[in-house]
Every structure is written in C-alpha cells, then in structure tokens.
Amino acid sequence: MKSESSIPVLPAATWKQVQACARAVEKRINQTGLILTMGGEPTFVPFQPEGEEWSTTALGPTKLLYARRFAAEWVQRYHPGSLITQSYGKQYPGEALPRWNLVIHHHPQRNLWSRPERLLLGPPLPPRQLANPKKVMQALARTLGLSTHIHQAAELSHPKTIIGYVLPLAWEKKGWTSAHWSFPSQPRHLIPLIPGDSSIGLRIPLNELPPDQLKRALTIEIKDGGLEVFFPPLDPEPYLRLVRLVEKWADTLDLHGLILSGYQPRQDHNLQRTILASDPGVIEVNLPPSQQWSTYHQQLEELYTAAHAVGLCARKLHFNGRVHGTGGGAHICFGGPEPRLSPVFQIPELLPAVLSYWQNHPALSYVFSGQFVGPASQAPRVDETMPGTLEELALAFRGIRHFPDNPELYAMLFRDLLSDSSGNTHRAEISIDKLWNTQHANTMLGILEFRAFEAYPEVRQQSLTGLLLRAILAMLMHRPKLRPILPWGSALHDHYFLPSHLWQDLDAICRELSRYGFPFQSAWFRPLFDCRFPEIGILPLGSAGSIHFRHALEAWPLLSEQPVLGGTARFVDSSTERIEVRLSNTRLAGEGWLLINKVPCLFSS
C-alpha cells in the first residue's frame, strides 16, 4: 500500500521485534486468567479534503458517499457476505438531522448478504431507476401474511401525496405480528407524519396510538437517491430473518439502490459490527473489540488499505507543510468479553493503578495526542481540570475496597473526578463514561477509554501505540501498583510541552516495560515522534556543538463565548506556537547562555 504519510514504515526486521513483544504481552495477560479486549476509533479524510464537512461539521455533501464506498471496498476485499446497513446516531443542538452511521454486520459462520450490488453503495440514483415502494411493500407483506395491514404515509401539509408505506411489525413467540393503526381525524390506513427530513420510520406519531398498541413498524420510501427499507427494533435472529426476506425479494423484483436502514439489532456475541460514523471533520470507524493485539492490528491494516483504495487517508496537511493526524478521536478502548468480566471490575485496584501511572507519565498524555492539548483540550489530564481533583482522587483510591462487587458504585466513585473542567465526563483523558453509566443502557460496557490519542498516517505506528497501552495494562493487571500522585504544578507544561522531556519520559516507560519482560524499545517510536515534533533546523557552532530548533506543544487558551448560528460557542486562540531550542553541548550553560525551563537555550536581545 502506498504511504501518504511523512512517517516511514517500520522496517520488516523491526516489525518482527514488535510482534515478538506482542506475544510476550499476550502471554502475560493469559497468565492472569482474564480476557482484555481492545478496540479503537481511527478516523479518515480524503487526500485533499475540502469543505466544512472535512474540517468542522459532521454532515456534508460528499461524506456519506465516501463512507459507502469505504464500506463496500472493505467488505469486498476482506469480509464478503457482510451486511451493510444505515442507521442514525447522535444529534447535537444546531444540527438539523441526526448523524448517520453505516453499520457493517459480519458473522463468523453465516453469510448475511450475498448481493452487495443491490445496495446503494455509490452515488444516488434517479427515481426512474428505483422500484415502486408500494409494490415492494406488498411483496414483503404477502410473504409475512400481513398484506392487509399496510398503511400509507403522507406529510401533514400534503395529505394526498403519499411518500411511503408503513407496515406495523413485531416478532412475538416465533412469529410475525402486526396491527391496524388509526389516527384521529385521518382516513383509515393513512399516517400523518411529524414534519421533518428524517426517514418516515422516525416520524410516525406513535404517541397518538393507544398505550397498549403495537408501536413498531417496517417502512419503505424513496429517499436520498435510494429505496430505503427501514427496520423496526428487533432481536438479532428475527432481524436476520427479515434481512433474508428483503434479499429474496430484491432478487425476485430485481431491486437496485437499496438502503437497509432503521434500528439495529441488540448486541450479540456472534454478530460483530463495525461502524462508520459521521463525526465533525472526519469519518470515524468504530472497531469491534479484539481479544488479541494481532487481531486489532489486522483490522487496522484492512481499514487503512480499503480507505486508501477509495481516496481516504489518516493524515491532514497544514499550510505550513506539517503533517498531522486526522483528529476527531481515534481513541483506544479496553474492556472484557462481557461488561462484568472487564478486568477493571475483576481487579478493583487496576483503575487506580492506571490513573496514577498516567499522572506520573506526561508522555502518555502529550506524545500521541492531537495538535490541541492542555486544560481546554478534548482530553485534559486529571491534573489539568478542577482544583482539588488530585486530593479527591487519592481519597477515591482508598474507597475502592468498599465496592468490590458493585460496578455502579465503583464507577460513581470516580465518575465526577474524571471529566474536563466543565464537568463533561466524556471529555477526560481517561474516560469511564462507558464503564458502568446507568444513565444509558448502552454505556454499561465495562470499557476504559483512552482519549489522548490521535489517528496516525502510518498503520504500523497506529498499531504500535495500541500495543504500548496494552503492555502497560498487562503490567498493571499483574502488578496493580499505586504510584504516588505527583504535584507537577507549572513544571507539567514548562517541561513536558517540550519534546526533549517527553522523549526522556517515553524512554523511561519503555525501559520499565522491558525490565518487566516486554522488550519495548523507544526507538520504535522515533519516526512518529519526529513527525509529531518535527525539527525546524540546526545551527552548527563548530567545536561548541550545535543549537537544535524543534516544534513543541502549546496549550491554546479558551476564549469567551461568542454568538454562532443562534447559539454560543467558545473558540481557542491558536495564534501562539512554542519552539524548543536545545543545545547539544550542555557545558555552555552558564557561560553566556541562558537556561529556559532547564533546557539550555541561546538568549538574544
């Protein structure tokens, strides 16, 4: 695969060393008797991204088309027989529509969809190339024995213009069931839709139905250049039954441009899912959990290859020539095969050990993060948030012994301490928002999320970073030692926004892992480090050595609220940039030279 990155690919000999290190890590995890799953959220953009959809907004004119081609390429190359569906995700204030998700279902032993050419995986089709929704609904309903239950759907403002068809549908006691719906002041079989641009399956006024009425439905309409079949909420087995029925009629009626949409089936250990999500500025890929690092790396290799084939990559180019990651996430997550079997719950001392280890090693916060770091970033360290957090965190460490078998109270012990300065628990460097959050059914997952990690242009560097985290967790699982909380104060930014200090800390982490039995080498990270902190230039001084200039980190200050699109937003001031100036000959310090932040620098007036 051609590299679009300035980070060189790790040589084959080095990669063999990395794989040997990974085997040592997996062996140590197996010795604990626990399963440590890992996943991630790499992000991708076009080679030449243009428009707000590739900088600040989640939706746009080309992003869904890129995602469809991306999904089709990945399925065709590596997972034929997978099912590509479309669903709806988050919707934030100011966004007219929910963000779309492309969900790829794959089963280890079953072929879920055989004819991808019948799906809309390219540009929208003109209406004349799409089948009549009424005929498709009638065919499906006849097979289900429910043809008399079909309803017509129309906008309230144009009740005579039918835009789609609705079949109330649910699976009960190994069979399909339906109902006759009746809405006040409307003719029989006519459904007045709630105004909006979403699928009609999301705009049925279910609140107007009797409380004991069936409130699930299959809908069909022509939407966004495709024939959309919207699925009701179903368990995995009936969901796949309905998929097979739709595929059968797609062949019989020679359907094209199908969009299989609607509610996704609940999680099932045999039905794995990979999600391509619309996120601000990027396409984000949510990987299914892997029980081995080798599987995690294989998934990344497949995605990077498929992305490149359709014109996507994991890097952005800035006007000054610097190469950056795509941003938008790329977080790395760890958990267990089941929520309660997560190592975080099986080893109560593990989370305190992780938090204290990260607090002791700023390199884990800054070396692999995005361009924006510090208190106002999307992944601030625990000591960059609210005053007094460190003292309360130390108190929480002592409280874990009181909740050994209660995941809810265990998570609540740390929840309000792991957040940003505004109290947002999702925007913490180490987020437990998906550990055991009882506020949402899909966030009680036993997952520990590390958010200070960027998507890297070169896939092996992405995998290597995941292995570093897995090795640290393996070490802490075997020996959950609590490190003393360090009062960094101003030294945190004064020292560790500078590459030299960060490299020393990263090297210390690798040496500790090596002593523990994981032969990590800091040299493996040198290509990524040099891309993250590129050298600007060197001023030779003859026998006196040389002066090295290298890009460093800067914490952009958060500005006051400003009105934006009827609401308010807060921006960061990115007008400053820090540069490290380092002398190769430290003996010159104090001889006409000035020490700045304990790094010898030439002072010129």
Image (cartoon, rainbow, N blue to C red):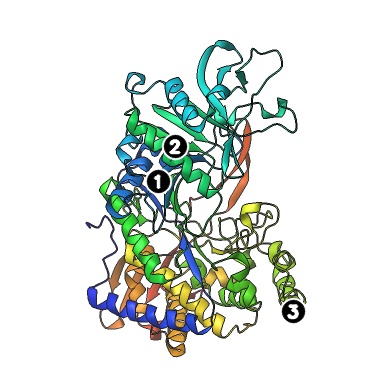
Q: Which residue is mark 2?
A: 260
Closer to viewer: mark 1 or mark 3: 1
Earlier in the chain: of badge 3 and badge 2, it is 2
Closer to viewer: mark 3 or mark 2: 2
Q: What is the crowding at mark 1: few (fewer than 14 residues within 10 Å), some, or many (at least 20)?
A: many
Residue in the picture at 26% in, 66% down: 9
Please name the amino acid that badge 2 sits on: Leu
Please name the amino acid that badge 1 sits on: Leu
Please name the amino acid that badge 3 sits on: Arg
Residue in the picture at 39% in, 74% down: 582
The residue most toward the top is 160
Q: Are marks 3 and 2 in contact (CB under 8 Å)?
A: no
Residue in the picture at 56% in, 50% down: 266
Q: CA distance from mark 1 to mark 3?
A: 45 Å
Quarter holding the C terminus is: bottom left
Q: Give residue 398's position: percent from left, percent from top.
A: 74, 79
Q: Which residue is mark 3?
A: 401
Q: Secondary structure at mark 3?
A: helix
Earlier in the chain: of badge 2 and badge 1, it is 1
Q: Give residue 344's position: percent from left, percent from top.
A: 61, 72
Q: Which residue is mark 1?
A: 83
Q: CA distance from mark 3 to mark 2?
A: 48 Å
Q: Give residue 567's position: percent from left, percent from top.
A: 63, 34
Q: Give residue 352's position: percent from left, percent from top.
A: 64, 76
Residue in the picture at 25% in, 58% down: 3
On screen, residue 255 above or below 505: above
Location of residue 383 by image quarter? bottom right
Location of residue 532 by image quarter? bottom left
Q: Secondary structure at mark 2?
A: strand
